[in-house]
């Protein structure tokens, strides 16, 4: 499974507050293996394809990261990084009936996942993760000042995950241990491939098959039938082309979703479907009627498109880089 697109590049220079060049700065597109390091003079060149939805991240230990979304291919970027201010955290011992080991257990299950790949993934710097638990709201939050380093030998990736948010709404701990009402996490990721063995490639293909990435690429290409995605609404199978309109723009595919009839203005849910593929069932909910898909299959408005069921079981332990299968 490969796709091709024309190459473009972005170049630039990274300096500090005194305009001195910074070497070995990470410059990468969020969620991909597309990245590079600055040289001893602070210069970098990053090759990529057509315009992406991914954020360009400029990150270096000891400095505050910069995030760029609006840039033109082949332009030169001048980037200044500021020294990060390290705030000494006060460690407060909470009597919440919830040990650190128990909090870590919940975190890893919801963050890495409980699939085979999720369970075999290892967080190399667990000590950098800290938690707060509110006994009144039953909300568990996780934080990490440095990127979480994940080793996924099953899929052959090292992942640097810069955690932006992790919040789990739990049932009361004493009444229902490990009971999760809802959980949300978000962050910035950089992938590094550490294996090209054929068995690893097969595992990656298996994970891709029917994944979120596969779904959005299929939507953008109107390739529902060949990719074996079947769409249902109200218990009846429907023709996806009648509910998803795809138009080409200069850089992206613009997808418009047919909204529910008799929708009230205050309703957040604009459309809801059941998705079936090879016997695996998922539900997809849209709180937006328009989104964009780039050449990689990366979609905009990810905070307004929700999955449950089979697809939602894939978490960071089953995550593939957005440029997977792209040449």
Image: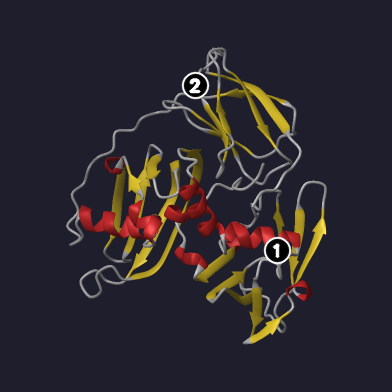
Q: Residue under circle 1? A: 219
Q: Is residue 170 left or right of residue 27?
A: left
**Residue 171 visible within the image:** yes
Picture quadrant of residue 47:
top right
Q: Is residue 116 left or right of residue 216?
A: left
Asked if 42 appears above or below 319 in the picture, the reply is above
Q: Is residue 190 left or right of residue 219?
A: left
- Mark seen at residue 261: none
Point out the residue furthest to the bottom here: 235
Residue, x 71% and y 48% (percent of image)? 295
Picture quadrant of residue 137:
bottom left
Q: Residues within 10 Å of mark 2 (few under 14, many from 20)?
A: some
Residue, x 50% and y 41% (percent of image)? 196
**Residue 266 visible within the image:** no
Which one is nearer the viewer's eye here, 301 or 312? 312
- Element under label 1? helix
**Disc number lying in front (2 or 1):** 1
- Mark seen at residue 24: 2
């Amino acid at each position: 499974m490969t796709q091709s697109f024309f190459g473009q590049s972005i170049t630039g220079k990274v300096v500090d507050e005194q305009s001195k060049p910074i070497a070995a700065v990470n410059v990468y597109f969020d969620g991909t293996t597309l990245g590079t390091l600055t040289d001893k003079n602070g210069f970098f060149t990053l090759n990529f394809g057509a315009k992406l939805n991914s954020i360009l991240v400029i990150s270096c230990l000891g400095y505050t990261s910069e995030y760029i979304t609006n840039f033109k291919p082949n332009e030169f970027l001048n980037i200044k990084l500021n020294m990060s201010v390290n705030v000494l955290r006060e460690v407060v011992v909470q009597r919440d009936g919830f040990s650190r080991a128990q909090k870590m257990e919940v975190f890893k299950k919801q963050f890495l996942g409980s699939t085979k790949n999720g369970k075999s993934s290892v967080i190399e710097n667990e000590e950098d993760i800290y938690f707060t638990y509110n006994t009144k709201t039953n909300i568990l939050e996780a934080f990490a000042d440095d990127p979480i380093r994940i080793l996924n030998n099953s899929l052959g990736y090292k992942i640097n995950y810069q955690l932006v948010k992790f919040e789990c709404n739990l049932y009361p701990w004493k009444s229902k241990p490990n009971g999760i009402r809802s959980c949300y996490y978000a962050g910035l990721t950089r992938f590094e491939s550490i294996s090209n063995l054929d068995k690893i490639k097969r595992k990656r293909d298996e994970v891709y098959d029917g994944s979120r990435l596969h779904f959005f690429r299929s939507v953008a290409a109107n390739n529902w039938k060949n990719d074996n995605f079947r769409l249902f609404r109200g218990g009846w199978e429907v023709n996806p082309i009648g509910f998803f309109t795809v138009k080409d723009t200069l850089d992206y595919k613009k997808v418009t979703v047919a909204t529910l009839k008799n929708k009230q203005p205050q309703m957040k849910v604009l459309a809801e479907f059941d998705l079936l593929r090879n016997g695996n069932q998922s539900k997809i909910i849209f709180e937006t009627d328009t989104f964009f898909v780039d050449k990689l299959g990366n979609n905009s408005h990810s905070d307004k498109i929700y999955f449950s069921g089979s697809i939602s079981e894939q978490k960071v332990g089953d995550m593939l880089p957005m440029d997977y299968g792209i040449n």
